[in-house]
């Protein structure tokens, strides 16, 4: 039907009728037709190896046959019930998911997106701790709602501003050099001006700085911890802790509601923390009355290979875990898992309701995804193919000066190109070693072409 849908027509409709804030990584995005496992197909029948899996979302493969069959069966029976009726798909899913988490993380809230999950986690942290301040990492990404945007690299108070573009790459790149700062209305006018000035200096003419004072945040401040010096991610624990303590000790942050952290920063370019850092950070947060939230939206469901959850790779136990993306292989679904105690604190202060959360379609798909991960040993595959590929890319680093760093874990790999650009590699967990060979070779020949063009 769409075969004759001319690309120019797509561009025209896109410009006229779709959000101008919707950015894409590509100047001319592919017009896709079909998907099968790690492969995508366009209307001309060209086949593409998908090494980003819809931004780390298609966990078990495009249109996985088992997941599709389960979805089609459920679709023919019942899509939606709302929380006023029960449907066993929801209960079965809750039981299956909770079995994958350690005690006491056993209470599950079902929603539809990563942003919603982190919004809810923020509410829980505040309801439980009776505090308001939240700590997150500079360079972190937790969603696109006003609350989660303020957690994501952009809410700041007493923030040590970056000296280069590295830390702000997400917003300078993704919003076409527009840096949006969402600030608490508790900031003085003078402080606002200072922020704007410092950002303009840091980013020069490349960036437009827009400041939004966000009334809803009230006195609920978000503090962001600098992430040590760029590039020194493996040996810098003491420096990280020092900066973490500085942030905790700012006068308003003496008591904390919560600390949000991605076990590996995804959007920022697969950035890892020094060994042992999170363990110490969790302790410091808890000493000040806060709860610790692991954002597993990208790192969960076996993608990191060695463990099912990213927090396990740090040897820590969070109080709240948020998950989305790979949870249902691309079908909209998300979850927040917490302890009975924290769940009760939320229920005391709020009746939490979500129209689509826990619908039978999503739960049936989510259950099938969990089964496929187990039946097809996809966590083990992530581990094996991940190590294989990481070593291959590391070899390319020795061959090409333009590659500054190769890092990551399992099927979450970052290749840092000199000049602050990072390639992110995060294919579906069904990829094979021959796929990895092919991808590395394509990458290699692209680099050779790039070097040749530069030499001319
Ligand atoms: N947390 C992390 C770590 C993410 O990567 C994302 C999405 N990129 C989100 C939260 C937000 O998820 P969503 O887009 O489903 O709202």
Image (tube, helix red, strand yellow):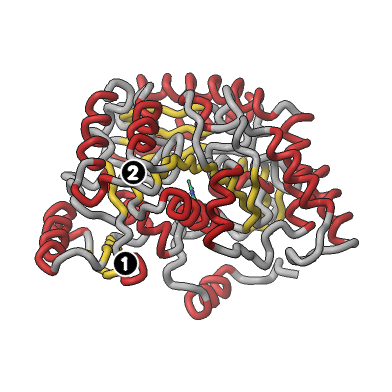
Residue 9's place in the image compared with 226, above or below, is below
Nearer-the-camera pick, 240 or 12? 240
The residue at the point 26 percent across, 48 percent down is 253
Q: Badge 2 local density, few (<14 within 10 Å), some, or many (20+)?
A: many
- Is there any visible trace of residue 180 in the rendered image? no
- Which part of the image, by quadrant, shows the C terminus? top left
Mark 1 lies on residue: 218
Q: Looking at the image, how many numbered discs can be counted on the residues?
A: 2
Task: Return the disc, 2 or 1, that comes first in the chain's sequence.
Answer: 2
Residue 164 in picture, x, y percent from top left: 19, 45
Q: Quadrant of residue 281?
A: top left
Q: Is mark 2 within 8 Å of ligand 1?
A: no
The residue at the point 31 percent across, 69 percent down is 214
Residue 416's place in the image compared with 195, above or below, is above
The residue at the point 41 percent across, 24 percent down is 396
**Residue 137 bears which disc, if any?**
2
**Residue 180 bears which disc, if any?**
none
């Amino acid at each position: 039907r769409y075969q004759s849908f001319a690309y120019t027509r797509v561009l025209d409709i896109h410009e006229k009728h779709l959000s101008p804030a919707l950015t894409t990584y590509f100047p001319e995005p592919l017009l896709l037709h079909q998907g099968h496992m790690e492969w995508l197909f366009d209307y001309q029948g060209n086949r593409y190896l998908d090494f980003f899996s819809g931004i780390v979302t298609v966990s078990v493969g495009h249109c996985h046959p088992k997941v599709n069959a389960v979805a089609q069966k459920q679709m023919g029976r019942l899509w939606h019930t709302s929380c006023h009726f029960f449907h066993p798909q929801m209960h079965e899913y809750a039981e299956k998911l909770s079995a994958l988490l350690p005690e006491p993380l056993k209470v599950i809230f079902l929603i539809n997106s990563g942003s919603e999950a982190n919004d809810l986690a923020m509410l829980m942290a505040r309801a439980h701790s009776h505090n308001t301040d939240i700590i997150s990492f500079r360079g972190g990404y937790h969603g696109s709602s006003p609350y989660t945007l303020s957690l994501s690299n952009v809410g700041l108070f007493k923030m040590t501003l970056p000296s280069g573009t590295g830390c702000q790459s997400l917003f300078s790149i993704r919003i076409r050099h527009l840096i949006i700062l969402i600030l608490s209305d508790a900031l003085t006018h003078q402080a606002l001006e200072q922020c704007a000035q410092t950002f303009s200096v840091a980013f020069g003419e490349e960036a437009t700085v827009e400041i939004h004072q966000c009334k809803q945040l009230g006195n609920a401040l978000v503090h962001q911890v600098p992430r040590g010096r760029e590039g020194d991610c493996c040996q810098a624990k003491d420096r990280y802790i020092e900066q973490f303590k500085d942030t905790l000790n700012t006068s308003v942050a003496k008591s904390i509601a919560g600390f949000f952290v991605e076990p590996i920063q995804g959007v920022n370019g697969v950035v890892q923390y020094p060994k042992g850092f999170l363990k110490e950070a969790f302790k410091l947060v808890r000493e000040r009355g806060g709860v610790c939230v692991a954002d597993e939206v990208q790192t969960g469901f076996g993608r990191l290979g060695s463990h099912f959850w990213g927090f396990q790779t740090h040897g820590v136990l969070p109080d709240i875990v948020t998950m989305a993306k790979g949870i249902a292989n691309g079908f909209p679904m998300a979850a927040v898992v917490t302890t009975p105690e924290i769940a009760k604190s939320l229920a005391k202060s709020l009746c939490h309701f979500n129209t689509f959360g826990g619908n039978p379609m999503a739960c049936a798909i989510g259950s099938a995804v969990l089964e496929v991960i187990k039946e097809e040993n996809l966590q083990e595959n992530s581990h094996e193919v991940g190590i294989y590929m990481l070593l291959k890319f590391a070899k390319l680093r020795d061959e090409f000066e333009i590659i500054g760093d190769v890092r990551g874990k399992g099927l979450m790999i970052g290749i840092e190109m000199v000049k602050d650009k990072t390639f992110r590699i995060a294919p579906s967990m069904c990829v094979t070693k021959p796929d990895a060979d092919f991808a590395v070779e394509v990458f290699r020949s692209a680099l050779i072409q790039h070097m040749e063009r530069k030499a001319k």
